[in-house]
Amino acid sequence: MAGLLQLLSSGLATGAIYALAATGFTLLWQASATVNFAQGEFVMLPAFFVLASMQLLGLSFGWSIVVGVALSIVVLGLLFKRLLVDPLSRYGFMPLVIATIALGLFIKEAVKTSFSAEALPFPALVPPIPVHMGDVTLSLQDISIFVFAVIAVAALQLFLTRTRTGRTMQATAQNRALAVILGVPVSRMILYTFLLNAALVSLASILVSPIYLAKFSNGESLGLIAFTAAIVGGFNQVRGAILGGFVVGIADNLTAAYISTEYRSALPLVLLIAIILFRPQGLLGRSEERTV
Amino acid sequence: MKKVAAVSIAMGLACVGFAAQAADPIKLADVCELSGGGAPVGNNWKNAIDMAVAEINAAGGVLGRPLEVTHLDTQTNPGVSRGVMQKALDDDPYIVLGPIYSSATMVDLALTQQAKVPEFTGGAAAGITKQDDPYIFRMALGQTATIPKVVNYLKDKMNVKTAALVWVNDDYGKDGRDAFTEEAKAKGIQLVSTISTEAAQVDFSADVIKLKDAKPDVVFVYTHEEESARFLKEARKENLQAAIFGDTTLLDPKVIALAGDAANGIRGHLSLSAGAPVDAIQDFVKKFQAKYNYVPDHNAIQGYMTIYTIKYLTTKIGKLDREAFAKAMHGLTITPKDEPGILMETSWDNTGDIDRASFIAEIDDGKQKIVETLPKLHH
Amino acid sequence: MNGLGASRNRIVAMAVVAAVLIVVPLLLKPYGIYLLSMWAVLSIAAVGLNLTLGFAGQVSLAQASFVGIGAYSVALLTTQGWPFGLALIVAAVLAFAVGWLLGYPALRVQGHYLAFVTLAFGTLVFLVFRNEEWLTGGIAGINRIPRPSLLGLSTKPPLAFYYLCLVALAIVLVLLAALLRSPWGRAFVALRENPIRAMSLGVDTRAYTLLAFAIGAGLGGVAGAFYAPLVQFVDPGSFTLLLSFNLLLMVVVGGIGFFFGPLIGAVVAVLLPEWLRFTEGLYLILYAVLVIVLMAFCPSGLSGLVERFRRVAPATSGEAQP
């Protein structure tokens, strides 16, 4: 029993990491029907912006975070939208898919070339001190990631439902044609979504890099997991993504402990297939209008 | 469509390439994992090779000729690797360096054998030197050499009766798992749990819980550096009682730095590593760090030694003769007195297997402490 | 598809390309021949994916798995002494059957959701290849896959095996062209042009969608059957999402739904990185940039570009080089 509790709580902590990456993914899909296959690389990159500010500009860790987040919002939010998504999205689904796949390769190789293929240590905001809670031991770092992730998603949810801008963004996502008729500045709303995604991946990057270390290839596994989590939770609901992250984190652990360590990453994928077949809107998602 | 035809012709012509011109430098081809999953390993190897080549060329080259090395990226994909190995051989190199991954090496060695070009591999899988291939030479101490040393130590010195194995399910980990499973069985150590982990795994709680249930005397860990550190942290966090033992990577300075206190008390077998208690290796590590700004791994040390092996033996033979080179490699011993660049005394047997001394070490207060020196298998 | 109408220009162009493909390898070193063989093999897989994507409109990210299923079938059977021909049939049938089964979700979900299902499936297949060691040899893969002998002729030399792959590609293309001209094939084309209209005209869109998916998968299996003896080694790492992405790239860059599109796309995916190798550490970066630029300026792929060029200058056919 103690083992089970430990597995669940560790799974929640890991799941929070996945949730952060998955949330931005969901946001982009909602607002602009962009499936970003470079999302994993988006989570990997901001940590390197921070490291570069520390090494090249000689800034303190705190200021480097500010610079890193700002850079990420410009590069992964504004430039990503203006240079890649805007020119390509009018051609439909596939060209953009291919372009984001290529972008993922580009970011990965560029980081490898400018830094190195080595995993670089990244300073932790919260130290990994063990915290005992009954039979369960978690590190303060894990708990902080969990808390940050929940706060970030809750704040996002509040923003989207309680503020005028947020509600306008949601309306735009749900019915763009109507939003245009109602005089909503649609392109600005979509831009906000991209900036929000960039902010979220920066947060994820800074939180997970002390554990994952800053490494060019981090995006590969993170991207796939974020993807899985987003779909399991509900591809068109922000709060679905956080549930999806937790489900994936826990499923992984339970499989490894009770079924098979070789197939530990299989259960989330099986879940994904089952959910798409039987509940395509995801655990918390709304059902989506079929166009055909 | 005509445009397509024109493009096809251009494409064909571009593939033709030009016949190798008789040039002054001695051509070496490096075929290794510069991108994809094996990139950290391949880049260590490449950087150290570049460093050794630059040193040797600055000192007048080999037989008065400079070395020239071409690096070819396998993308950590055996299909690509077989292709670029062919590309390397089409260029008629004196010697081929790499690849590091055992699977890629197994694919490529038939090509170098056919072309009669000596190949130095970083692969550690037992099978590599069992192919009756007179042109393949190992730079990594093969698992057939290291794992028996480990198991002997566990049995004789630590009195271990039951063991559990934590391995990373990839090219690197599988070799270790196979060798350890076989050797433990042969020596009568009962393997109570075998746990497969993933490269880039973050959460080790399930693995540690399984180990706590299995209650082995010792846990043998065969994973990459970052995962080793995460495993150690989780094991300490959950207060795993079993002794933890590993091979080379587990004791790597990078693991110790990442795991902090959690690394204290672990023991392991140590072949080449940046922490090896050999002055020449420490000097190399300093030079490498100054140039590339990170701590090299064992692949870097091996890449460096490879170039100096080539320099030493070619100078000794006095001409570029691949067949003579391959023949002379078998049964060769190089000591640092003969060639300082070899860093520590190294021998090759008749199958191309490498042999050198290694150590058993313990991590004490964040530092490697050598418990025992294990001599070469054959003196 | 208007491209199937055999204009004189088109036949001339095809003859020139065929001649180039037959003659140029004679001038190449083994590496060039290996690359061209890889191009031919991956073209077969991309042609299959083009049927799934271009005609049935189904986004599949599992094509690498079908290539893997084909490759493992041939690897396992021919190393046990089976003749290549028989193993090839097993490979194609097995991939077709698995594709058929996976195609069922294709009927329930469409577009991006199918992409997700196939993506998950592809990763599951990788896990099976890696974990079922008793069958597949695990992560270390299967080595020393023999190259077949045909009519007493060994295809061990690179050139002989290349011609075998080229013949296989030609047969696949001829069969596919015949299929697309048949009443069945017209239904595929109708499906691509306008699924709703096709349905109202009495085309059983469900069956044809499933069939397009399964045939696409089967061609992936055929490609795998040639991949195994080409590389003479298979391992799980060769058939991951990366290859699926690459095959998708070939189809999109070549031009979705264009008959010869995948062949042109495969040139980009297989040979372009090779030509960029002179930039050493930068070659993959440049490759990625070129792909993005290509997508931005020519979203219908290179075939679309050719098409556009032809439309702009229909009369000046003498202007292009022969």
Image (cartoon, rainbow, N blue to C red):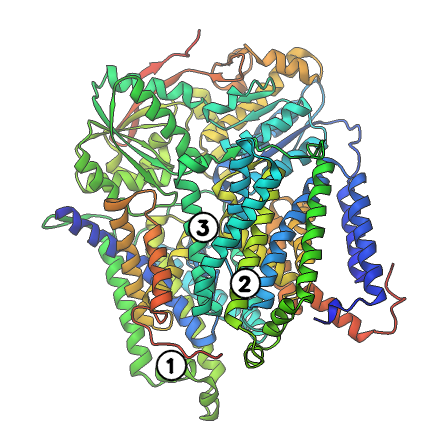
Q: CA distance from mark 1 to mark 2?
A: 39 Å
Q: What's the distance in space between the residues labelled 1 and 3, CA to CA?
A: 40 Å
Q: Position of residue C286 (x, y in %)?
A: 63, 54
User: Residue placed at 43% from the left, 55% from the top?
Assistant: C121
The mark found on residue A55 in the picture is 3
Instruction: Give the amino acid type for the residue marked by disc 1 in the picture.
Output: Gln
Q: Could you tell me which secondary element the residue under label 1 belongs to?
A: helix
- Front-most of residues C195 and B161: C195
Verify CB contact (< 8 Å) between mark 1 and mark 3.
no
- For this rendering, which residue is in front, B58 or B163? B163
Subunit bearing disc 1: A
Q: Are marks 1 and 3 on the same chain?
A: yes
Amino acid at dot 3: Gln
Q: Considering only vertical position in the picture, is A89 above or below B232?
A: below
Q: Which mark is residue C211?
A: 2
The chain ID associated with circle 2 is: C
Residue at far bottom of view:
A182
Check chain identity for marks 2 and 3: say if they share one: no
| Chain name for mark 3 | A
* Residue B73 placement (x, y as % from top left): 59, 40
The answer to whether one can see residue A71 in this image is no
| Residue at the disc numbered 1 | A170
Tell me the residue at 69%/63% (across/down).
C259
Regarding mark 3 in the picture, which secondary structure is present there? helix
**Quarter-wise, where is residue B322 in the image?**
top right
What element does badge 2 sit on? helix
Decide if residue C229 is in sight here. Answer: yes
Dot 1 and dot 2 within a common chain? no
What residue is drawn where x is 44% and y is 93%?
Answer: A182
How many numbered badges does the structure rendering display?
A: 3
Q: Quick check: A73 left or right of C263?
A: left
